[in-house]
Amino acid sequence: MCGRTACTLDPQDVRSACAYTNRQGRRMRPRWRNPGGGAGGGGGNHGNKGTGQTSKQKDNTKQQSDGTQYTPKKYWPSYNLSPTQVMPVLVSSSHFDKQQNNNESDTKTQSVGERELCPMQWGLVPSWHKGNPSTVSYKMNNCRSEGMTEKVSFKRPFEKGKRCVVLADGFYEWKTGKDGTKQPYFIYLNQTTPVTDSQLRIDPDITAPPEQDDMLEEEEVKGQEWTGHRLLTMAGLFDIWRPADGSDPLYTFTVITIESHPSFSWLHHRMPAVLDGEDAIRNWLDYGTVPHKQAMSLIKAVDSLAWHPVTTQVGNSRYKEKNCVKPIELGKPPKSASSNLMSSWLSKGSTASPKNSQETADEKRGKKRPQPSASKPSPMMAWLKKANSDEKLQKVTGGPPTPKKAKTL
């Protein structure tokens, strides 16, 4: 399964992380195409064709002739992405060339590269779907490889070459324990430095996507290559749903899943089909050279993943704090901000005061100073003692830890 991901790079960084060597041997950053109407747009890009201008987020709810509505969305980097949200996707530039051939007067967005980045909504909406697209997108976030050539919703785009590479820092999966509890893990491509942090540049307190360039042209890599973490590259399929009123089309995708590799099956019996390496990515995207039957050989389990346990708070799709991807030590619940403050206060209060000269002299002469008589503990100390006792009892009885709010960063 793959039902939750993290993708924290902004469009410019995604391009840098996806640099590739073209057929002429040049290192290129692919074009970023974010057409008018949000992630749904594909070839229109009305108003900002190749200019690098930005478009502001607004209420783009579409009213269809049959009364249904849908709202195009834009890509927004996040530590916790779920189906129906937008993620960056790699596709062959040939898909856009076909659209331009049908509109020869529009030459400003003619593709010159081999691949492009296009933000798409997670959850495939078939091109032939009638009515509100939101009624089907959530159910189509994954495509089982076993039914990819049988189920019409997936068979048609697969046979038409609508293959894509879904990009993310990593994805989340839950391990179900014998007692039914679920522990989330963050999974990513195996690399020298584990993905325990990210490059998120957007304030999580912002409630709407910032302004974005509608078009970032392909450019040659000059100077230093990308030095950040490797992005997870998952095989997917995409489709284009066109509204009845002729407005901007909606681009959506699904992640292909397969039986897990033996090294991963302890965590879950399914996993995304990972395309590990430039050759696998190129062959999956190049539908003109690699027909769909041959491309099936690329859909296989690979032993190229790494993982670590993370906070259970990631189970809430609205929780998008930085600690979503931070590794935790199992069995030790994280301390909350209030508990850290209390510990600091207690440590200051319990610091022993320096001994005065009389105490030092008495100790040297062997005199024993009278000890203060035991007094009744203060209400605060009694409460702390009870809290510690309850915690010890909880560990003995094996009860679940009391959920605590994670520290806000």
Image (tube, rainbow, N blue to C red):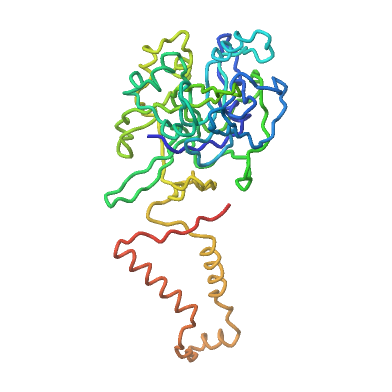
Residue plotted at (30% across, 39% down): 266
Q: Nearer the viewer, residue 58 or 163?
A: 58
Q: Nearer the viewer, residue 334 or 131?
A: 131
Picture coordinates of residue 156, whole percent (x, y): 41, 17
Horizontal placement of 324 versus 152: left or right? right
Quadrant of the image containing the N terminus: top left
Picture coordinates of residue 118, whole percent (x, y): 57, 24
Picture coordinates of residue 295, whole percent (x, y): 39, 15
Q: Quadrant of residue 273?
A: top left
Q: As drawn, which residue projects farthest toward the left? A: 178
Q: Nearer the viewer, residue 149 or 384?
A: 149
Q: Is residue 102 above or below residue 361?
A: above
Q: Is residue 96 above or below residue 170?
A: above
Residue plotted at (61% across, 18% down): 43
Q: Is residue 92 above or below residue 198?
A: above
Residue plotted at (44% across, 18% down): 157
Horizontal placement of 237 versus 218: left or right? left
Q: As drawn, which residue projects farthest toward the front? A: 66
Picture coordinates of residue 392, whole percent (x, y): 35, 68
Q: Quadrant of residue 306?
A: top left
In this rendering, the count of numbered labels is 0
Horizontal placement of 228 versus 148: left or right? right
Q: Nearer the viewer, residue 98 or 61?
A: 61
